[in-house]
Image (cartoon, rainbow, N blue to C red):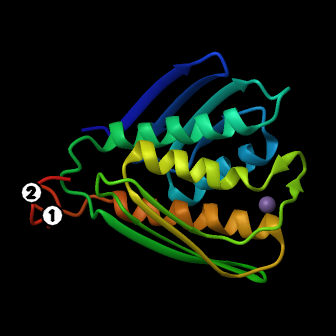
Amino acid sequence: MSRTATIERITKETRIKLSLDVDGTGQATICTSVPFLDHMLNLFARHGLFDLEVEAAGDIDIDFHHTVEDIGIVLGEAFKQSLGDKKGIRRYGQATVPMDETLASVSVDISGRPYLVYNVNLPKVKIGEFDVELAREFFQAFTNHCGLNLHINVMYGCNVHHIIEACFKAFARAMDAATQLDPRVEGVMSTKGLL
Ligand SMILES: [Mn+2]
């Protein structure tokens, strides 16, 4: 059974079309009109070995906030739809990724319960035109709409580009681990019987 989703979401603020294949090979076609987010989603797909297409247009004449947040919403929703009843998945995943002077660790539990822990200290700066505080908005939106525990901890680092990039790479690898099907798992990985 294919684990894919295609979602189109249109509001007065943004228009987003996204296709996800959880069992992909890392093929990405990303065009969000937010260059730094394109960079992050490209490497998310590559390092998570997900196939991902994102086409987005938004009210970036105001700022990138709505576009970044709404892409987080749609990507989270796409994982939720793709995983369906979550039968056979490993459920938990974690990855620690270095990037030069930075070390980032991400742990996920695809539990159905949204909770974000975000221990990422960033100065209020921009990377290009991208406000770094929007990274949190993206992860919060993803968390709420995928329904998972997402814990992001940056142990150390000083270059903000490296810090956010290491977070996205660790996020990708943790999601890849957690979404893997394990033939030993009968039903869902829960003593409750429901995720
Ligand atoms: Mn980079």
* Foreground residue among 44 and 112: 112
> Quarter of the image holding residue 38?
top right
Check contact, mark 1 vs mark 2: CB within 8 A.
yes
Q: Amino acid at mark 2?
A: Gly
Quarter holding the N terminus is: top left
Q: Whole-percent x and y of residue 176?
A: 43, 60
> What's the CA distance linking mark 1 and mark 2?
5 Å
Residue 31 in view of the camera: no
Numbered disc total:
2
Residue at image location 57% in from the left, 53% down from the top: 139
Q: Which residue is found at the position 62% from the left and 40% from the top?
A: 69
Q: Is the CB of mark 1 within 8 Å of ligand 1?
A: no
Q: Which residue is under mark 1?
A: 190
Q: Residues within 10 Å of mark 2 (few under 14, many from 20)?
A: few
In this view, the residue in front, 40 or 50, is 40
Task: Tell me which amino acid carries mark 1.
Answer: Ser
Q: Circle 1 — which element? A: loop
SS assignment at label 2: loop
Is 180 placed above or below 93 here? above
Nearer to the camera, 160 or 40? 160
Q: Is residue 146 visible?
A: yes
Residue 167 x %, y %: 63, 66
Tell me, for residue 66, which label it has, or none. Answer: none
User: Which residue does the numbered mark 2 point to in the structure image?
Assistant: 193
